[in-house]
């Protein structure tokens, strides 16, 4: 199974919105409602931001939302704040019983 | 407090073995699936293995299948990863991460701080 495809980097100004894409195939993202998103600050443990494509864990800001269309999932962050600057990873269940991560996207809040 | 604490990392030569441990506290360990996820230097996250809660099955990434074995001891709230035939490409920070349910693929909501494995001659 190949890694899911994410842009290597994105940037936006504080207060604006940004969407990070995650492209897979009909054997993973497109088949199962099992995409999750993780925020990872350097030196810290990753944090679950979205699970099952669109669900947000308690305690995660409602500025974070997930969506999916076909073989592509997206994470949207609205009202960008400096503390949102981090790496973001998507992850999907894939047929065969594995989990696949995307390559990660570095978000810079200018 | 819900917590995962990894240990057992270290320096090993290619072909060698290591056993990682992940001690859980603050929740009913047996009710949750647990995963191992690693991050090689300057690389992204990679899922390694997962094991279901309540006696569930184990699953592995193709890159470690046949070399790594995941197991759990619910009586001591501990997860293990036995790593054999280690290769340089197994060098990484290894995290244990709790799934949100007894099944391992429903999102990982609790992570440890990781333990570092270095494979080099």
Image (cartoon, rainbow, N blue to C red):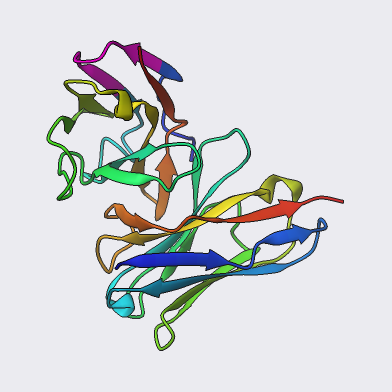
In front here: B23 or A2?
Answer: B23
The percent position of residue A109, horizontal first and vertical second, equals 34, 17
Q: Is residue A105 above or below residue B41?
A: above
Query: At 28% across and 10% down in the image, what residue appears?
Result: A13
Span shown in magenta: A10-20
Question: Is residue A43 found inside the magenta-colored segment of the image?
Answer: no
Q: Is residue A33 above or below residue A75?
A: below
Outermost residue to the right = B121
- B19 vs A90, left or right, is right
- B20 vs B71, left or right, is right
In front here: A12 or B74?
Answer: A12
The percent position of residue A72, horizontal first and vertical second, equals 27, 27
Query: At 40% across and 73% down in the image, what residue appears?
Result: B24
The percent position of residue A79, horizontal first and vertical second, equals 17, 20
Q: Quadrant of the N terminus of chain B?
A: bottom left
Q: Is residue A14 above or below residue A101?
A: above
Q: Is residue A71 above or below residue B38?
A: above
């Amino acid at each position: 199974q190949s890694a899911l495809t994410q842009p290597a980097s994105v940037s936006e100004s504080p207060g604006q919105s940004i969407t990070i894409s995650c492209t897979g195939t009909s054997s993973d993202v497109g088949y199962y409602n099992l995409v999750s998103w993780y925020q990872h600050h350097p030196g810290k443990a990753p944090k679950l931001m979205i699970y099952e494509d669109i669900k947000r864990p308690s305690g995660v800001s409602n500025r974070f939302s997930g969506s999916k269309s076909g073989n592509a999932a997206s994470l949207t962050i609205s009202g960008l704040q400096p503390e949102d600057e981090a790496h973001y990873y998507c992850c999907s269940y894939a047929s065969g019983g594995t989990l696949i991560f995307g390559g990660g996207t570095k978000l810079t809040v200018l | 407090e819900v917590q995962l604490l990894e240990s057992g990392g270290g320096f090993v030569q290619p072909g060698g073995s290591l056993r990682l441990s992940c001690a859980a506290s603050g929740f009913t360990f047996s009710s949750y699936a647990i995963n191992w996820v690693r991050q090689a230097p300057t690389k992204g996250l990679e899922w390694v293995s997962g094991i279901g809660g309540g006696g569930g099955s184990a699953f592995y990434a193709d890159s470690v299948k046949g070399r790594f074995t995941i197991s759990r001891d619910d009586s001591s709230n501990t997860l293990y990863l036995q790593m054999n035939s280690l290769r340089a490409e197994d060098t990484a920070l290894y995290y244990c991460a709790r799934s949100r349910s007894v099944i391992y693929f429903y999102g990982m909501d609790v992570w440890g701080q990781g333990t570092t494995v270095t494979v080099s001659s």
